[in-house]
Structure formats: C-alpha cells, structure tokens
Amino acid sequence: MSLLNFGSFNFLASWGYIDWIPFLQLELLYGFGPALFIYTKSLTDQSYRFTRIEWMHFVLPLLEFIYYRTSYFRNGAISLSEGAVTQENYIYQIVQWGGLVSLIIYLLLTVRLLLKYKKWLKDRFSNLQNRELDWLEKPVILYLVFCIIWIPTRSIDILFFSETLRNYYFNLGFLSLAMITFWIGFKGYITTHISSAGFVDNVKVSPKADVIDPDLPIIAKDLEEQMLSNAHYLDKDLSLNTFAKLTGYSQKEISKALNSCLKLSFHEFVNNYRVDAFKKNLEKKQFEHLSLLGLALESGFGSKSSFNLVFKSNTGITPKKFKEQLLKKKS
C-alpha cells in the first residue's frame, strides 16, 4: 500500500492531476501496526484463529480511511509553510503523529510477543530449527528504528526548515517501508513453520516462589542422571513433552526443576549434553573419519547452523577453533 500510494502520488502529480491526490490517499498508518502484530500471532501459533473482538484493532484504520475521504483531510493536508495554520491543519497533524505513535506501540507489542515466543520455545524444544522467527525479528526492529529516526527528522524539517527537506527523505522512507514489507511477505511465504502449535502470548506465568519445593532438587538430579544414562539428548527432536513421557515427570515439574535448581531452560539443558558428547566424540578414534558436522549429528544436533550457534554460545569459541586447540594440545 505504501508503494502504491507513493506511485499514484507521483503519477498524478506528474500528469497535472494533483487535485485528485487527496481523494486517492491510502496511507493507513493505523492499519499497519495491527496487521503486523496479528500476522506475528498467527506465525507463533499454528492453532491461532482470528477472533471477533480482534476486529477492534482495525477500528482506527477504518476511521482513518473515512477521514481521508473528507474535506478535513483535503484542507488540512496543505503544507504548514504555505499559510496560516487552520483547524484542519491541526487535525491532519494529530492524525499523522497519532498514526506513528500507534505504529510504535504495535511494534513494541510485536517485539514483546517475539521475545516471549523465543523463551517459550527454549523452555519446550531442544531443537529450534524451523521454529524460530529470527527472519521476522530483524524487519520488525528495522521498522522500529525507522520510526525512531523518522519522528525527529520530520519534526526538525517542519519546525526549522518549513518542509524544504521533505524531498530528500519522504519518498525514500515510504519505499523503504514497502521493501521491508515485501520481504516479510516473501520470507513468510517460503518459510516452513512447524511443530510450534500451543503458544499463546497471554499465558500467565506463575510467580516464582521464595522457597524452593524440597522435591525439586531431587527431581533435577534424577533428570540429569536419566538424560546421561539413557542418552535422551541423541534424539535431535527431543521436546519437553517427549522428555516428560520418558522420565515420568510432568512438564511443569521438569520446567520448575530446571529453572529453579539448574537455572537452565530445557533447550540449554539438553544441548549442554550434546556439546559434551561432541567434545568426547572428537577424541574417539572410531569417529576420526567424520567431519565436524558428522560429529555434531552423531551427538544429537539437528543441523549445522544450530550446532554452531549452540556450541559457540556454550564454549565461547567455534567448533573449528575448539578442534584446532585440541590438536595443538595433543601435539
């Protein structure tokens, strides 16, 4: 829509139909934030369904659309530098700045949702491949940075330069937003999103108790023993649900024991064993013929990218560097 708005504006202006621009204006500043937020909700949970009450998110975009069709917009959209400030000018500015504020609020809500989803994943899955939404986090952060830069830039231009700088950043800004949006749509379309149903962004987290349940340390110790003796970590798709069935504890008991006693998420807990297994396999002669990736798969990791990320996070160095240091010690 930003790109369409940008194209139609320049086309009409170049052909001398500038008077038609106010009738065709289609910014929908108030619609972009809710759309991105609800799109993110649908990605974080495949079981998500749009509810009736969520139509409330689009009341302001509807009112904005109606506003653009009225004389209040046509009269108020005139540049402030071209004459005395009228009531229509004030209304126009309020709508414009209100749209930016709305966008920032929804962007912050989206970032918060993505962070909660990431934590939820780490508490339930040992392998995050095809479940993470890193590809969405970056564009959302870019949107947020854009808004943070846009507000002071626009304010300075209006207050001190009478909008003479507009041509240097305005169209470029709209094009940038359109390109980022196309990227989200393209990436979201080709990205497979699996095995993450069940997340809801309003899950109530129970407050941490001041006194640890006396049974939790016992459970934590038993979990460690079972993980090591039965080598459950070798299952590359091991989840909290599967682990609960294997150990006989409930998912809640496991999460509480890991978080309270070991200060680890389920993802960290399992991958610590995989990293240790990789280190041991690296020194075994029976695995000398395997590459680093082969050793990683043998140790329970599901992919090269997740292995490299987890190993470096766990040890502070890359697997290749670790192997070089190990060979250096032996020589």
Image: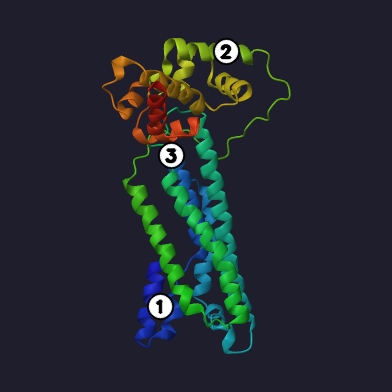
Mark toward the start of the polypeptide (2 vs 1): 1
Q: Which residue is mark 2?
A: 221
Q: Position of residue 51 (x, y in %)?
A: 50, 45
* Disc 1, SS: helix
Q: Position of residue 184 (x, y in %)?
A: 39, 53
Residue occupying the point 37% across, 48% down:
188
Callout 3, which amino acid?
Glu
Asked if residue 195 can be seen in this view, the reply is no
Q: Position of residue 116 (x, y in %)?
A: 55, 39
In the depicted view, which residue is nearer to us: 315 or 194? 315
Mark 2, mark 1: which one is toward the viewer?
Answer: 2
- Find residue 207 and report its image quarter: top right
- Find residue 305 and report its image quarter: top left
Q: Which residue is mark 3?
A: 132
Mark toward the start of the polypeptide (3 vs 2): 3
Mark 3, mark 1: which one is toward the viewer?
Answer: 3
Mark 3, mark 2: which one is toward the viewer?
Answer: 2
In the depicted view, which residue is nearer to us: 27 or 174? 174
Callout 1, which amino acid?
Phe
Q: CA distance from mark 2 to mark 1?
A: 67 Å
Do tag 3 and tag 2 residues touch (Cβ < 8 Å)?
A: no
| Residue found at the very far front of the displayed protein | 331
Q: CA distance from mark 3 to mark 2?
A: 30 Å
For the N terminus, give its image quadrant.
bottom left
